[in-house]
Image (cartoon, rainbow, N blue to C red):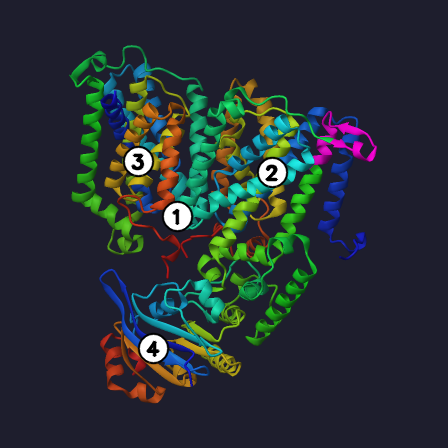
Amino acid sequence: MTPILEISGLSKNFGGLKALQNISFRINPDEIIGLIGPNGAGKTTLFNCVAGVEKPSLGKVTFTKDGQATSIGGRKPETVTLLGIARTFQNIRLFDNLTVLDNVKIGRHCRYKSSIFGAVTRSRSQQAEEKAIAETAEEFLAFVGLKGRGGEIASSMPYGDQRRLEIARALATEPRLLMLDEPAAGMNPMESRELMDLIERIRKKGVAILLIEHDMKVVMGVCDRVVVINHGEWLTEGKPKDVQNDPKVIEAYLGSGAANAA
Amino acid sequence: MFLQQLVNGLIIGGIYAMIAVGYTMIYGVIQLINFAHGEIYMLGAFFAVTFISFLGLPFFAAFLLSMICCAICGMFLDVLAYRPLRESPRLAALITAIGMSIFLQNLAMIIWGSRQKPFPHGSVPAYFGQIAVTFGGVNLSWFHIFIFSFTLVMMLGLHLTIKKTRWGKAMRAVAQNQTMAALVGINVNRVITYTFALAGALGGAAGILVGAYYNSLYPTMGYVAGVKAFAAAVLGGIGSVPGAMVGGVILGVAEALGAGYLSSLYRDGISYAVMIIVIILIPAGLFGKLIKETKKSM
Amino acid sequence: MGRLRIQQLSRGGKIRIGLLILVLILPLFPFISDYALHIAILIFMYMILALGLNIVPGFNGLLDLGYVGFYGIGAYTSGLLTIHFGLSYWLIIPIAFLNGALWGVLLGAPTLRLTGDYFAIVTFGFSELVVLFLTNEIWLTRGPLGLPGIAPPSIDLSWLGGPKWEFAGEVPYYYLAILMVLVTVFVMYRIQDSRLGRAWFAIRDDEIAAVSCGINLLHYKVIAFAISAAFGAVAGSFFARWVTFLSPDMFKFWESFLVLCMIVLGGMGNIWGVMVGAVVLVSLSEILREILPLLGLPVEVRFLVFGLIMVIMMRFRPAGLMPIPAVAAKMKAGQVKRKPAVATAGSKK
């Protein structure tokens, strides 16, 4: 099977700091991959390199959709989104002053095209588009379990709901690959279980998932494979169980004082 | 002719530099374009004249006292207007800065009137007007030499203060990272307020020098000078103190030569044009690092 | 489109319709002097300016300090086309709109990729250059002497065999200004509620998240800036044909500041708030213009009050008198105390 995302020899330097060195791994179209590693290992930097926020110093990132391979290293973030990669952020980034529904509608943005003239004249095609945007946005809200909450202001929702809204917004861009940056952070056990269920359902829609997560229960529970990086270098990868018992991984975590992996 | 223009440019450029370092230092510590800085410069000139005419102080005493007053004004500006907005979006602080600028300008208009004023007769030392040196057809008065050496000493002193003193190190630390600076025990707010004081003193001094040099002061004088000095700071790279000094001198010279050889009508336009072109082509300026404000938290 | 039924309107809607009717019949009252109408027209013109400017700071979270530059370009374009070519006002409006938009693109495209502070200062420099140009290019603009004798607009039906009717007195301008305000408000509402408007709001609230939703920042900021500039130029074209005299002094930074003050006071991003801001500040300005000379102060000093209003609003009520709905809701729930909510671009999150 052609992988949906292939990262090969990816490196990123910030001045003298080597944030990522020669990272390679691949994600298959129906896989849920966990990306773990101690704090400062370079996980978010890797996300940013894929998403186009950072330009890789070296190496290739190839995204394959419908048999068509595109090299995306260094592409602009909006282009990457348009190609079919969506993401959420470690510290939730919602459009705070807008309603929940508008947040998701903005996620739908890149799949439509009406602009100023359509807006002012409310042409028939623009009205049809608006209707479609509203309907699909509602569907995505319902999918993450926020049905009927569209009218609330995004920033006034509870934390866990904000996380789910951010996922709904990312899904609204119709990605083939979804990158989640610590989605379970700050969630209680029940919320994490719901999150795991949500991640499974997203995969069933045919979306591959790359997941950064510190909550090992979530990682063990949903991931097909786990990639471990440490100090910006690829450490190991494999089935969650194997990785969990890998002495190298335990050392990496214990060495840096994060005991929750052991 | 060319040499004379060059000398004029250097003198005015030095003064621009003194104002520009104020913009740059403040931008360095709190990432704010302090639009009211030009008004501190204007206040400097008016304070000096007031001290001379009402307290009968001699020129240099009034000069010094006015610098102190401008430093205090700078501190008040920070504490009253900007400090409450530290956690607010930058737009709020920027709008406040513009509001303060307009407010101070009009306050000066109420206090001192809107018409141009000269320095009181005989208050500026008489020997300032006398020619000190002549070379290659260029006449240098004692006032030229005073301005030149004063700006030089101030810039050198500022440079040493920032590089060598404890306080200068604290200021650089705050400019780098406020949170970290606070963690290592630096009183961030105090450092910022002192930066405003220092910027105010230098800006005020520049105002007195210009007021005395052209023998004219008016409440809106800070407006144009402020923009030009800001252009100098941008040219040098905002946030970089040596950059502001070099930028000021380059701009002063460019303006003097441009006004002499191209068109004096667009004298002020040269600064605006330089500023816009630099911002578009090399936003980091000659010495600065590009500031990526939106990516800070990633 | 649905037909309008009075009983279906909300209370706010009824109030607005009532206000509009009142405004429409205002000139019929005998106690309304020409001076009062003049002030009303001034208010309407500033409403257009404020609504136009609002797009940039209110919808996109960017500070535009050079708005008056576009206003000046529109006014002089209108004046010169009228004097030299006798162009009809109805033709000048679209020309002014396109001309303003063109200048907006020319200035915005290279500068809108910059961070907010730099953008603000570039717009400032631009408007100062416009004033210098108007002052110094005497062959075109007559410089400080000003441009007198601009013909008022007329409604010419002679091609239909009808009469030609030239604007005289304040009343025709009054209705023309109302019409222009209504069109502006209509356009703003439509945009606010569209894919374009949502893209702007996304940029205002969080640029990085906006990009991750596939929004091309530069593209949408340039559109915003161009539309804003276009409305500025249209207001200028009206101004030229109304006062029939232009001088470079009318387009100094003060004007940009005054318009900015209107939207800050009224509530950045809120269409109604911005219009209320225009009403309050134009009225206040006129009142101060009467009072200040009595106190022996120059009329320019009224800007002291405006400056103070800006500072106080930012400190205590940064969202303005009429905040955008989301902020209003949060303020009601006590979630926002002093934290300004609008225009968070580049905020320290």
What's the residue type where badge 1 is placed?
Arg
Q: Mark 3 points at which residue?
A: B20
Q: Do labels 1 and 4 share a chain?
A: no
> What is the x, y in percent for residue B182?
28, 53
Mark 3 and mark 1 lie on one chain; the one further toward the N terminus is: 3
Q: In what element is the residue under mark 4?
A: strand
Q: How far apart are marks 1 and 4 (CA)?
A: 36 Å
> At x 67% / y 37%, what residue is drawn?
C91
Q: Which residue is drawn at 21% across and 42% down?
A: B162
Q: Residue at x 59, y 56 (%)?
A: A115
Q: How far apart are marks 3 and 4 (CA)?
A: 48 Å
Whether marks 2 and 3 lie on the same chain? no
Disc marking residue A36: 4
Three-letter code, disc 4? Ile
Give the Cα distance between marks 3 and 1: 23 Å
For label 1, the SS is loop
